[in-house]
Image (cartoon, grey):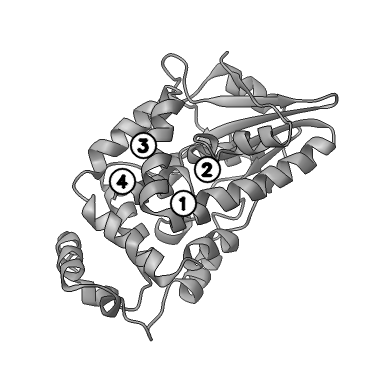
Amino acid sequence: MMKTLRHVMASAALVSTLFVAPLAVAQTAAPAAIPQAEGQGPAMWVIRDADSTLYLFGSFHFLRPDTKWGQSHVDAAFASADEVWFEATDIDDAAQGMQLMQTYGLSPDRPLTSLLTPEDIAALDAALAPMGATAAAFDPMRPWLVSLQLAIVQLTAAGFDPNSGVDKVMLARAASLGKPAKGLESMAEQIRIFSGMSEQGQVEMLRGTLKDLDKGPAQVEALLAAWSTGNTDVMGHEMIDEMKAEQPEAYEALFTRRNANWTRQIKTILDGSGTTFIVVGAGHLVGQDSVQSMLAVEGITAERVTQ
């Protein structure tokens, strides 16, 4: 579960659209105040050249409403931006999300239980029992979709909400300030990342979810504490290292390839001028294959902002 919760909380923003009713944010309404972080707060980096300033801020897509993550220097950087970039800006399009889920999340010709061992099915039955469901009821779904759904059920039961997540809050803030919001990718692209994994890779993802089901809540709390205090070393270990070793296909799809794509786009942004604020899942800004590491290979240095 923990590895899948990493995907949900700090990797792919699409999941809030797939399973949770989106918040109807009035484009002119002032967003709610963010509880101020204690100490250093979540990490942010800055890149500067002769005529450009670019900020990188790592988000959590699901947060509790009372999570303390606001920081004055982040607010100032955001206010200075000419435009704001997110993983995707169409995450509130529920109709599109449901259509994409029908296209990429279902495979009635390949029933879920036909892909699983008896032990897998028993574990899935046990996980679904509190919902009054069984593994057979999920037969039309592809393994990646079941894995994410289990993770989100656990997150929402623990009080986490995508409408309190960094992406939704900052999208609303950009709208209230009249700042253009742009996407590094689309919802469709994000969904195809999951659905494009091999069948075996998806089954491994689901098995990892089931294996760590009981450990999830405590590990999420530890990960949230690391993010909210800017402890990138802990985040890299908890979010990246284990997944890279145990689920290499999912890691390649969710992190390495996307980080490389975003690095190319950031280089293009830097070729222009002005100030840009970029919000992406925190998992993309830690570890050896982070966006900053890929930019460094291109001779572009990102510096940590501490105040």
Amino acid type, mark 2:
Lys
Amino acid type, mark 4:
Met
Residue 261 badge: none
Amino acid type, mark 1:
Tyr
Residue 181 locus on image (x, y percent):
68, 44
The 10 Å Cα crowd at callout 1, few under 14, some 14 to 19, many 20 or more, is some
The 10 Å Cα crowd at callout 4, few under 14, some 14 to 19, many 20 or more, is many
Residue shown at the point (54%, 65%) measured from the top left: 192
Mark 2 or mark 3, which is nearer to you? 3
**Residue with the mark numbered 2:** 168
Q: Earlier in the sequence, mark 2 or mark 3?
A: 2
Residue 238 badge: 3
Could you give the CA–CA distance between mark 2 and mark 3, rounded to whole angstroms?
Answer: 24 Å
Tags 2 and 4 touching, CB below 8 Å: no
Q: Quadrant of the C terminus?
A: top right
Q: Earlier in the sequence, mark 4 or mark 3?
A: 4
**Residue with the mark numbered 1:** 251
